[in-house]
Amino acid sequence: MSKLLEVHQENVAKFLSSTKKMLINGEWVPSISGKVYESINPANGEVIAKIYAGDKEDVDRAVRAARAAFKGPWSSTSPAKRSKLLNKLADLLEQRSEEFAYLETIDGGITINFSRYGFVPSAIAHLRYYAGWATQLTGQTIPFSTGGNLHAYTKRDPIGVCGQITSWNIPLLGAIWKLAAPLAAGNTVILKPSQQTTLTALLLGELIRDAGFPDGVVNIVTGSGGKIGEAITSHPDIDKIGFTGSTIVGKGIMKSSAETLKKVTLELGGKSPNIIFADADLEKAIKGSFMGMFTNQGQVCMAGSRLYVEKKVYNLVIEKLVEMALKMKVGNPLDPTSQMGPLVSKQHLETVKNYIETAKKEGAKVLVGGNTLHDSELAGGNYLQPTILIDLDENCTAVKEEIFGPVLCVMPFEDIDEVIGRANFSEYGLASGVWTKDISKAFKVINSLEAGTVWVNTYLNSDNAIPLTGHKQSGIGAEMGYPGIEAYTKTKSVVINLD
């Protein structure tokens, strides 16, 4: 562990020493029920914190605070001031980035290098990106087609109170995704972090207070996804839902939100196809495809979990992938040399293992990996070897369903039309990739794939200005880019008779 990281451990230990409360109306408060739940370090199974578990009544408190803030001080806060507050929050996060990286790692099992150089800097950049958009939201002046002395224009107004529900795999970045755009647009927020990885959202709450956001603008309610999520999605005084998580839960949110006609943004599951043609730069394609699958233990919604390889180079690609898997260091996520840490929980580890066993029963071959790790250093943790499956097709459970773990399905193909059809043979449409030096071939695949994102000769490269969207059952609406903030506004049309 680095000396720099050790410097910040004392602050984190102090933060974890008390039962963590919820942030409602600018105050840290316990749940009304007084119930608590435990946060478990996935690297060793130890309890690292206790957190108050909220309920419907706590959501009611948060909604009242958010509605009062929306109608009160936040409504009179200028776009420039909102921008300044978001940039101030980014400054504070940057100053304490090592604390957040450490906490993110012990709470979620994310490797320290990925926390330090990936998720935390991305969260800071995301805040600054939407801080810039706060002053750039504009409407249109519209010529009146029937003539007359009439002036027509549109303006974009904030939607109101937003219920924002995050996933467990990217705790801090996920919370920032659910805060930056709605706040920049002038909304107030009730944030529901995942019960499995709650802590960085609560530490972020301290920075939100320190940055000077008015009371009630951001409220953080912790607890069960079922209880709190249902209370948020069904609450009559919440105007918009933003959710990242599974497709099954997303469908339930749509049903619940329909009762009050809430607007929804849903970033849901994925089973993304990644295609390597024989004419690709194979060294880059193999390395990029490997990292596009095993980054963050494969717990990435856009992971390239279905790898299609042209038959001419299939054996070569398989050989290189196995070499990389065998060399990949699975270890303590606080060790900077670890390339893969533990899965988020014992329950999730068992889920992923069950997918591997089902694949074997259906005829798949485990080419490498598939086993849990229990040596002395890793005892008590949720460690699984990077796993590569072959001898399967689109009807196999491991190919059809989102495993959300370090399991790569590799399949050969003969030609471009075949692989396009097979790639699209999925209920999901979140992301995809194609590796080729032939630009015309690349464009044919780009235009044919049913996915919200297509990467060409790269994988998982993203930018705050590029919208993240899901096709088919991978979601509704967009996060990031201009569409990401537009989703938190509503259009108002104005017609003025100047006579």
Image (spheres, helix red, strand yellow):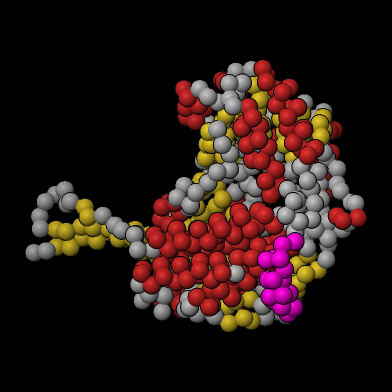
Point out residue 254 in the picture as x, y percentages from the top left corner: 56, 54
Residue plotted at (72% across, 68% down): 6
Q: Which quarter of the figure has residue 113?
A: bottom right
Extreme-right residue of the structure: 376
Q: Position of residue 21 (x, y in %)?
A: 67, 78
Residue at x 53%, y 71% (from the top left corner)? 92
Horizontal and vertical percent for residue 152?
A: 20, 57
Residue 206 falls in which quadrant of the image?
Answer: bottom right
Q: Residue at x 72, y 23 (%)?
A: 316
Q: Is residue 397 magenta?
A: no
Camera-side residue of 215 and 17: 17
Q: In the visual, does 141 lie left or right of 56?
A: left
Give whichever of 474, 89 is nearer the camera: 89
Q: In the image, is residue 304 above or below residue 192?
A: above
Q: Quadrant of the N terminus?
A: bottom right
* 72 on left or right of 295: left
Looking at the image, which is closer to me, 99 or 230? 99
Q: Quadrant of the C terminus?
A: bottom left
Figure disc tally: 0
Res 240 seen here? no
Magenta stretch encompasses residue 16: yes
Residue 48, x across and y down, in percent: 77, 69
Residue 390 appearing in the image: yes
Query: Is 135 drawn above or below residue 476 in the view shown?
Result: below
Magenta residues: mostly which secondary structure? helix
Is 156 on the left-hand or right-hand side of 415? left
Viewer-nearest residue: 266 or 339? 339
Magenta stretch: give its range.
Answer: 1-20
